[in-house]
């Protein structure tokens, strides 16, 4: 008896040692486990009747229940009749720098397991998992037994099975070729709010990434993908079941005006993009996660040192009528006054200004130390958007000719709009535009587009993408203004948590039109608007300001905008809840900037924990009762606490004095 106890104790100690050293242990013939470095996150992998399933726990609580894995391909079915072959594990420990992100330095630590399975033909499917302290990520790798140089991945069996008591904060995928001039899908839909899993989506075709789930009172899960390039499709979540299972789906056949396949065509051996699962008892790991960058590498080297910053943008408030030489001079002058780096000149510039005068405008901007970003229509045939310039970005010869001209006159960036979906053909177009633009030292912003999946690290001239129901809707629809504050407290936990988001914030006009005598009515306070410049992350931030704001706003508001960074060394989630409020802190160098916004229509009293600033004096721009902004000095107490009041749909900004 004592001998058996000693044997069992030795086995238990060996298991503990294996887990601590490798993060991996086999506990049964059909179950495999991989733990995070701190052992709080546990991945379980199981083979049942030839099918692979995984589940995920955080601190012993199940966040993802038994979820399927596998691929259906041209060389065979890797969804069933599989046999387990082997596993290898290793520790991943990598430090890297980012120059266009919400943080500048990352120490990535994870345990990796490569689990190999074979089908009846003895072709191999490797499922590669990485488990870090807050994230689980996985991808597939196909290796053929015989001489196969190519493969088509027709479908994945991948799924994400949330507990059935979970609720959703997710945005629907639209059906193709609908909406304005048949420009959808464009990732510009409204988020669900605390809906039960399995609730049918608006269009019946699932949801786009990233997808946020609340797992009852246990915590939160954010699901997304990263590392998608020209070799694969962009994926989405399909319709969920009442039990919480959301399958991964490929693009719809009608996307890109029906051209291109819905499958992924790859060279062998073939590795898919990574799917990512971020876990947290609170929302802090969701907001601060860097998993979309941890799993990818730079694709090519930059040809120049790309400069990020802030931009004025006439179109967002003054609309199409402002795309003329004289109005652009006004916005260049405003950019110079505010120390902005850029001005964005939107659609129709080729017809309303012309190429010859555009060259003159670029030189005028340079004389003011301002650079030009030009808008382009991506397409010639995958939607019906009429704006020009068109047919300049969709083929290599036209693209190279246009970019050579831009380089000659000194244009530093482009904003390319109206893409056709998530097919591999479209993903290749994104990559081709980025790659060609780098050869001419041109930075790239995408609009009317898909989610950027790891692109800030992959492509050195990628700046930002829309892929959100952005601020142009504030101008188009009063309903958007009426829900703006609420919506602003959703995005930091969803879309902006995984990538740069070109929302285009900070509006001071009371009515969103040129003369403020018509147009939609802004509901948020001035301090709220200022706070969104910090709340929303975009490597180049396009502002909703107009020249009259220079005379209407107090100098301390303008001075703050003049010094506002757009890329960060550190981002810290302080407090908040989707739809209610957000407090977010960002650091640039030694300076801290704290954004607080109230998403509700009632006064909110907050006690903020700013322990990193204990005993420090800060400037605070806050709400006056008349909804204008005021500034005062405040001191964080020794416990790191500060109480503030936010008006309904109000906000505040705190920052360390220069």
Image (cartoon, helix red, strand yellow):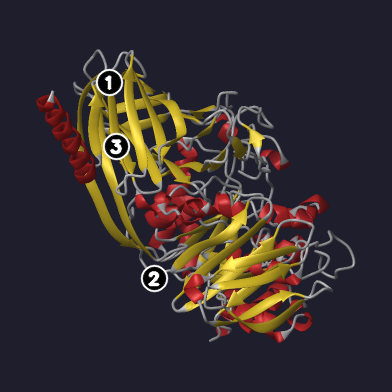
User: What residue sits 80% from the left and 50% below the top?
Assistant: 479
Where is mark 3, residue-wise?
34
Quadrant, the N terminus: top left
The disc placed on residue 305 is 2
The disc placed on residue 477 is none
156 shown above or below 182: above
Where is mark 1, residue-wise?
30
Horizontal and vertical percent position of residue 589: 44, 77
Which numbered mark, 1 or 2, is in the foreground of this view? 1
Given residues 310 and 647, the one toward you in this image is 647
Given residues 54 and 564, the one toward you in this image is 54
Q: Is residue 521 visible?
A: yes
136 shown above or below 492: above
User: What residue sits 23% from the left and 40% below the top?
Assistant: 19
Q: Is residue 540 left or right of residue 193?
A: left
Query: Residue 127 sits in which quadrant?
Result: top left
Disc 3 is placed on an element classified as strand
């Amino acid at each position: 008896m004592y001998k058996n106890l000693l044997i069992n104790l030795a086995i238990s100690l060996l298991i503990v040692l294996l887990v601590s050293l490798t993060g991996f242990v086999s506990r049964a013939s059909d179950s495999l486990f991989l733990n995070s470095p701190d052992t709080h996150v546990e991945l379980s992998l199981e083979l049942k009747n030839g099918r692979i399933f995984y589940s995920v726990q955080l601190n012993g609580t199940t966040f993802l229940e038994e979820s399927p894995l596998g691929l259906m391909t041209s060389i065979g079915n890797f969804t069933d009749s599989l046999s387990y072959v082997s596993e290898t594990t290793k520790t991943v420990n990598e430090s890297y720098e980012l120059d266009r992100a919400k943080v500048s330095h990352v120490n990535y630590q994870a345990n990796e397991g490569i689990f190999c399975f074979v089908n009846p033909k003895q072709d191999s499917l490797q499922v590669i998992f990485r488990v870090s302290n807050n994230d689980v990520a996985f991808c597939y790798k196909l290796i053929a037994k015989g001489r196969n140089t190519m493969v088509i991945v027709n479908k994945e069996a991948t799924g994400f099975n949330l507990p059935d008591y979970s609720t959703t904060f997710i945005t629907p995928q639209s059906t193709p070729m609908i909406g304005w001039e048949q420009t959808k899908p464009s990732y510009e839909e409204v988020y669900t709010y605390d809906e039960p899993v399995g609730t049918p989506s608006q269009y019946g075709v699932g949801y786009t990434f990233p997808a946020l789930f609340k797992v009852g009172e246990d915590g939160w899960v954010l699901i997304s993908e990263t590392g998608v390039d020209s070799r694969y499709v962009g994926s989405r979540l399909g319709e969920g079941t009442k039990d919480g299972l959301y399958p991964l789906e490929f693009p719809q056949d009608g996307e890109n005006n029906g051209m291109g396949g819905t499958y992924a065509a790859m060279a062998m051996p073939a590795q898919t993009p990574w799917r990512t699962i971020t876990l947290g008892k609170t929302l802090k790991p969701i907001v601060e996660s860097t998993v979309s960058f941890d799993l990818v590498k730079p694709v090519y080297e930059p040809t120049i040192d790309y400069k990020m910053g802030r931009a004025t943008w006439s179109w967002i408030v003054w609309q199409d009528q402002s795309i003329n030489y004289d109005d652009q001079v006004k916005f260049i002058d405003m950019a110079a006054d505010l120390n902005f780096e850029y001005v964005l000149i939107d659609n129709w510039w080729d017809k309303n200004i012309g190429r010859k005068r555009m060259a003159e405008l670029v030189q005028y901007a340079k004389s003011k130390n301002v650079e030009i970003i030009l808008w382009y229509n991506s397409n010639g045939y995958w939607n019906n958007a009429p704006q020009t310039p068109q047919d300049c970005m969709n083929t290599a010869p036209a693209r190279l000719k246009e970019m050579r001209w831009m380089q000659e006159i000194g244009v530093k960036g482009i904003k390319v709009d109206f893409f056709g979906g998530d097919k591999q053909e479209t993903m290749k177009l994104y990559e081709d535009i980025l790659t060609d633009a780098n050869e001419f030292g041109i930075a790239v912003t995408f609009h009317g587009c898909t989610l950027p999946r790891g692109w800030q690290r992959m492509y050195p001239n990628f700046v930002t993408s829309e892929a959100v129901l952005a601020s142009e809707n504030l101008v188009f629809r009063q309903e958007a203004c009426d829900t703006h504050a609420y919506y602003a407290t959703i995005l930091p936990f969803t879309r902006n948590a995984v990538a740069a988001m070109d929302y285009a914030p900070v509006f001071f006009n009371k009515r969103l039109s040129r003369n403020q005598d018509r147009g939609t009515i802004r509901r948020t306070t001035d301090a709220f608007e200022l706070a969104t410049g910090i709340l929303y992350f975009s490597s180049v931030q396009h502002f909703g300001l107009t020249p009259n704001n220079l005379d209407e706003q107090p100098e301390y508001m303008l001075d703050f905008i003049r010094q506002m960074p757009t890329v960060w060394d550190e981002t810290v989630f302080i407090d908040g809840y989707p739809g209610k409020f957000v407090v977010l802190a960002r650091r640039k160098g030694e300076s801290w900037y704290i954004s607080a916004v109230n998403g509700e229509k009632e006064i909110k009293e907050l006690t903020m924990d700013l322990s990193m600033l204990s005993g420090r004096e800060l400037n605070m721009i806050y709400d006056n009762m008349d909804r204008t902004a005021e500034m005062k000095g405040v001191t964080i107490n020794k416990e790191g606490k500060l109480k503030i009041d936010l008006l309904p749909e109000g906000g505040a900004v705190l920052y360390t004095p220069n």
